[in-house]
Amino acid sequence: MKRKFFTIFIVCIGFLGIMASASTTEKQTQTPSTWFRVSFWPDVIGWPVDEDIYGLSLGLPGSYGESKTKVVGADLSIIISESPNVEGLQMSIIAIGKDSTGLQLGIANGADKFEGFQIGIFNAAVSKSESYQIGLVNKSVNSDGFQIGALNFMDDGIFPVFPLFNYSKSKK
């Protein structure tokens, strides 16, 4: 039963990656692409290297990517996911992105520029973002988003620090 579920899951992720790559309106760069990546540790073992992933990136224990590569689909790892450009699901104990869109799930989530949902104990969006954060502690700088948590830090929020919830002044 588990094998059948895993096979269906991999096929669905691959299909989502193919659909996302077909619907992408951006100009494709010279970076080659593939539908599956496995990485173990930075600069030790990672296959394939320097390719965009349209499907599944699997990190055992971590997932890593170069600054020019992106993952469209799912970036799943055990300990740390440090793929800079993710469009889709990024799930790990620690999820770190640079310019990401979609859903980040983890104990600690962080991104420079993020659009979507961050769900974890600690969430951070460092620069311009349109993020919705659900966690114990949420931090956002220059955001057009909404936060739900015990402590919510938002530089341009209704209050700089507010318990339970906070939202951007520009989202009225």
Image (cartoon, grey):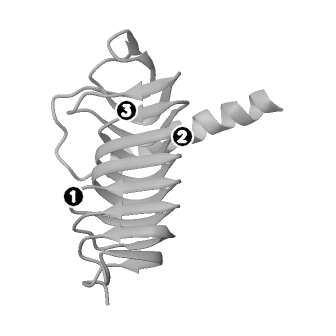
Q: Which is nearer the N-term, disc 1 or disc 3? A: 3
Q: Is residue 132 above or below residue 82?
A: below
Q: Is residue 88 visible?
A: no
Q: Is residue 120 above or below residue 18?
A: below
- Which of 134/75 is in front? 134
Q: Decide which of tag 1 and tag 2 comes sooner along the chain.
A: 2
**Which residue type carries mark 3?**
Ile
Left or right side of 155 for 116: right
Position of 137 with respect to 168 (left or right) is: right
Q: Quadrant of the N terminus?
A: top right
Residue highlighted by disc 1: 127
* SS at mark 1 in the image: loop
Indicate which disc, 3 or 2, sits on the residue closer to the N terminus.
Answer: 2
Query: CA–CA distance between discs 1 and 3?
Result: 25 Å
Residue 59, above or below 108: above
Farthest-out residue, right: 1
Instruction: Give the crowd class for mark 2: few <14, some 14-19, many >=20 residues within 10 Å.
Output: many
Which dot marks residue 13? 2
Residue at the (43%, 34%) spot, across then down: 81
Q: CA distance from mark 3 to mark 2?
A: 11 Å
Q: What residue is at 50 percent from the left and 28 percent from the top? A: 58
Q: Residue at x 26, y 32 (%)?
A: 69
Which of discs 1 and 3 lies nearer the camera? The answer is: 1
Q: Residue 160: horizontal and vertical position, in percent?
A: 30, 75
Kindly identify which residue carries mark 3: 53
Type of amino acid under label 1: Ser
Q: Nearer the viewer, mark 1 or mark 2?
A: 1
Q: Amino acid at mark 2?
A: Ile
Would residue 27 be visible to someone looking at this image?
yes
Q: Secondary structure at mark 2?
A: helix
